[in-house]
Amino acid sequence: MPQDREIAALFKLVDDGDERIAEAAWEALLQRADRARSALAAIADGIDDDGTRARGLLEAIRRRELMAEMAGVAADGDAGLDLETGAMLIARFGDAGADCDGARAGLDALAAGLRDLPSPSGGPLPQLEALNRHLADRHGFRHERAKIIQPSDSLLHRVLDRHRGSPVSLAVVWILVGRRLGAVVHGINMPGHFLAAWDANGRRVFFDPADGGRPLSRADCARLLSQAGVAFSDGLLSPVPSRLILVCMINNLIDLCERRDGPDSADAAWWDRLRATLLPDAQADEPTSEAGS
């Protein structure tokens, strides 16, 4: 039992039979995170009920702190929200042991390994094809269409380790590596399947990172939309801000948790709280998940 008397009392009340008292004690412990962390860590290794509760509280404290970080990242609006920072926060939220420094170094190494990116004066296609050869052909980044998307497919550090990911997480890899090389790359939240676009010399090419970066014409995109039962409009091919790319990643994780655990999934509820830091006003342009793609 924690030695801090206030923390000890609150810890006992977390297991109170009155749900309101238990929730209030839980919130009070979270508000005293610095003191509670050290006290709870001393008993978290136990295999009894106290150990289980302590581990749950420590995880809740950890995730609350990451939610605050994400809220800070999103505070300056779309123009100031850094996609890479947000993606790394999602990785840390889903995996307490995520090596984000290693993931950043991996992105740096992927960019450093491509030394022959063509000049933008030739337009976007030669640049895109060079990056496709590097990421898809040489390093094997791809989406396994026959498999249902797993949580690891939406956590950037795991995508960089496994070279496998969901369409949106692979788009993030193409975007972050491309931007390190000075390219202008955007996310395209097309319904049912996340795409990307590459701009150079006043021209734009759409492409599918889940299919090795395959270039797509507008007609190709219209066919993909038709297959998803969606009527084509130019607005569906507009670049989306980093905030919505991150929300799409989180939506995949919520969908997966609910499929695995049911609609009352505790993990899904945590991901929903993280998503709320990016969509505080429940905006109407919130993207759907792609977990079945």
Image (tube, helix red, strand yellow):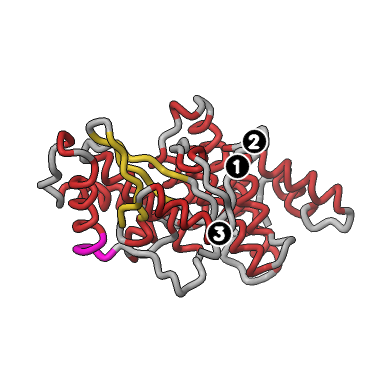
Between 161 and 209, the one lying in front of the other is 209
Where residue 223 appears, x then y in whole percent?
46, 57
**Circle 2 SS class:** loop
Most common secondary structure along the magenta stretch: helix
User: In the displayed structure, does residue 253 sit left or right of residue 143?
Assistant: right
Where residue 110 appears, x then y in whole percent?
22, 52
Q: Which contiguous range is marked in magenta? A: 136-140
**Is there any visible trace of residue 71 in the rendered image?**
yes
As drawn, the label of residue 192 is: none
Is the residue 82 above or below the residue 103 in the image?
A: above
Q: Which residue: 59% across, 57% down?
A: 229
- Which residue is under mark 2? 283
- The mark lying in front, picked from 2 and 3, is 3
- Which residue is under mark 3? 228
- Which residue is under mark 1? 286
Are discs 2 and 3 less than 8 Å apart at CB? no
Q: Of label 3 and label 1, which has the lower sequence position? A: 3
Q: Which residue: 53% across, 57% down?
A: 226
Between 258 and 128, the one lying in front of the other is 128
